[in-house]
Structures are given as C-alpha cells and as structure tokens.
Image: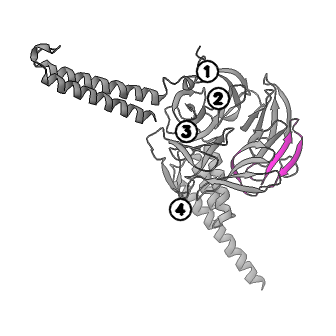
Amino acid sequence: MKSSKKTVVTIALSLLLLIMVINEGAYAEDSDLGSCELALYRCLYDPLNLGTSDGAFHCLLGYLFCKKYLDRI
Amino acid sequence: MVLSTVCSVICSAKSILTEFEEKAELMPAGRHFICGGYRMKAIRWAEMALILLFIGIFAISSAGILSPDRQLFTPLKLEEVLSIGSLDDDLLLQWVGVTVDKQGFIYVTDSLDYSLKKFDIEGQLVKKSGGRGQGPGEFMAPRLLDSTEKYLYATDQILPGILVFDKDLNFEARIPIQEPISDMKILGADRIIVVPFVPNGPNRICIYNREGTSSQLFTSHPESRGLMMEHFSFDCDEGMNFYLAYTFQDKIEKYSAQGKKIWENELFGAKKAKTKEIAGYSLPVEIVYKDVTLDKHGNVFVLAGNLSDNPGRDVFVFDSQGFWRTTLILADSSHCISIDDNGYLYSRADAGVTLKKYKIHYRPALH
C-alpha cells in the first residue's frame, strides 16, 4: 500500500517536472515572442490553467490587458 | 439630395449647351462669335468646365469644407497644462483608468498599488483608497473608471462586478456583474453601459442597472473574424449613438442605439493586424486602435496603435458624421485617452507613471 502511494506520487512529480522542462524548452525555441505573448504562453501552459477553458479565458483577458496597457509600441 | 440636385443641374446645363450647339450649326458662319473651326471646341470646353465646376462644388461640400457647422469646434492643437507623477516620485505607479468630475478633480485607478486616487486641479494628491484584497473597496487588479455627479465606478480584472465609491473615495456598493468587463460607460445609476469580454464571438453592448440586471442593446457583428478580433473600445453620445474603435481590426463604426450601423471608417486601408500562433491559438499581436472618446462638441477622438505613423500617440479626430477633421499627436505613447467636460484631454506618459492633461484648442468660431 505504502509503496503504491509512493509510486503514484513519484509519477505525478515526474510528470510535473517533465511539463516544466518541456515548457522551458519551448520558450527557448520561440525567441521571437514579445513580452505579452510570452506571458500568455506561460499562462496557458501553467499547470493550473492547462487544458481548462476557464484558465484559457483568464489568460486571454490578461493578454488583452498586457497588449493595451503594458506593451510598449 | 445634394447629389440629385447636382445631377439635375448638370443635365440641364448639358441640354442647354446641346441646344446652343445645334443652333450654332444652323447659323451662318459670319454670325458665330468664335471663328471657324474653333466653334465646336469652345462649346466642348465650356461644357467640360461647367461639369467640372459642379463636380467640384459637390466634392467640396461633401468634404464639409464649406459647411459652417463642420468648421466650428474642429480641434487644432493640444497644449500640455499639467503633468501628474514622474519617474522621480511614486504618486502614480501604473495608472490605468481615469475620470474627471465637473469640478476638475482627477480620479485614477493605479494597478501597481491596487488603489483609487484623487488629485485636485493643480495635480496634488487629495486622497487614496483601496488596497490589495477582496474585501469591500479593495482591489486585486483595478482597471476601468468612470463617474457620475455623485459616484465613481471602478472595475477589477479579477473580481467580478463594478465597485461604487463616493467622491471622497469611500466604498459604497458593488454592482453584481459576473462577466469580466472589457469597456464601460456610466450614464446614470441605472444606465451602466457595459461591453463584456468575449474572446471568441461577436461582442455585445449591454445596459445594466444598479441591481446588476441587464438587457442587451445590440451586437456589433453576427460573425466573429477570429479570436479576439471583435474586441473594441467604445464611447457614446447623449443621443445614445455608439462609436466603436476595434482593437485588432482597421475599423471604426458608429451605431444608433437600436444597433443600426450609421457609418464605418478605416484609416489604414483595411490592413490586417499581424497574428501569431501561440500555444495553438492564432492571436493578433498588433493593436490597430487603442481607444475612442468624444468631446462635448461631438467630435470623435481615436487613439491609434501599431499601424499608425506615431504608434500610441496619433489621435485621429472625426466629426459625428465620420469625416476626418484633423490628427493630433500626444507627447508620449498612451493606452487610453479621456476628455472631460471642460475641453481637457488626459493621456499617459512614462509607461503609466505620469498622467498628462492637455487643453484642446479649437478653431475660432466664424463671425
């Protein structure tokens, strides 16, 4: 029982680590994203937002604010 | 009506000239006022000149140059009269929303210290309220601001609803609106015009009362042109005509309160904003129009974005019928423009650390 719990926790942590590593790798590849676009990218791939429509909604709302109010043009 | 009048005049002129031409053909050569072979050419030249004259009059009157009404209250230039905040102080950290009351007090939301601030006509800080939190009068991400004679109305990007404060910045109430608010205009306590944030789909303009009950006024477009593409800023006049400036499309529109489009303008040849693929979403990355506001004379001021010669600084001014009047240039790039009832324009500088106040100078009235 204890060992199966340990296994599940280990797998979950590994998956989380994998997602973070993939994300970091992805940022490095896409170096021509602006600051707002990069922030959106990170927001969408945040584990709390990943794959949820609510999360995507709030990320897009934040992107709009960033483009309008923060992005220097 | 003008077009039909001009057309009938041109037709009458042509028939008169044709009649003259026919009579000239029948007259003995010696009685022509122009010698020999130049007779027909002169008639043709006169005909062309008359037609061009009337076309010119029509074009000029359409452009509004001759119309005395359209010459009045054309903004000529901006004169900076006040600057609040700088890189050397912390009066303003990153102001977002601004509104001005009839007495000239300036109110702003400041997103970096989660506050609502009040400045007097000299730019001195009078009061500050708010703070980070979800309690009464607190903010998580303060944004838009508008006012009536008695109250201030502020939105928050994270917390739902509209927060209502009195002019001393005391929290009064929260109007329960569940959808995040993209833009708003307060016409009265029970006439709160709101555009909810809709990332994918047509945008709609709704009117709320103080209880949070809404009814939809109209939808800007039945079809969406892509993610975020239908987003716009708006303002409305006393006749409840709406002026929409699209954030990611080259389009400025005027609608009646019933949702009938009155006119549409584009300043950049309907050029499309650039898009990028971000995490599987195709999103616009260039802003076409940043904001729109009206002055008390009905002039429409549109702050342009990336596609303009001076991005974030060019302010295109139209009259209420959509004719371009002039272009003003701000000292620094801004995210918004606001005009008070006394003819002053407010905009941002130094990336939100400074609020600039400009006097709008208008063309002198004709005598």
Q: In which image quadrant can residue B245 be found?
A: top right
Question: Which mark is nearer the camera, 1 or 3?
Answer: 1
Q: What residue type is labelled 4?
A: Gly
Judged from the image, the secondary structure of the residue bearing numbered disc 3 is: loop
Query: Which residue is identified by label 4?
Result: B280
State whether discs 4 and 3 lie on one chain: yes
Residue B237: in sight, yes or no? yes
Which residues are drawn in magenta? B156-184
Query: Which residue is identified by label 3?
Result: B305
Question: Which mark is nearer the camera, 2 or 4?
Answer: 2
Query: Which residue is identified by label 2?
Result: B297
Circle on res. A48: none
The answer for which chain carries disc 3 is B
Q: Which amino acid does label 3 sit on?
A: Gly
Horizontal side, residue B316 vs residue B188: left or right: left
Mark 3 Cα within 10 Å, few/some/many (few <14, many 20+)? many
State whether discs 2 and 4 lie on one chain: yes
Q: Does the magenta stretch include residue B166?
A: yes
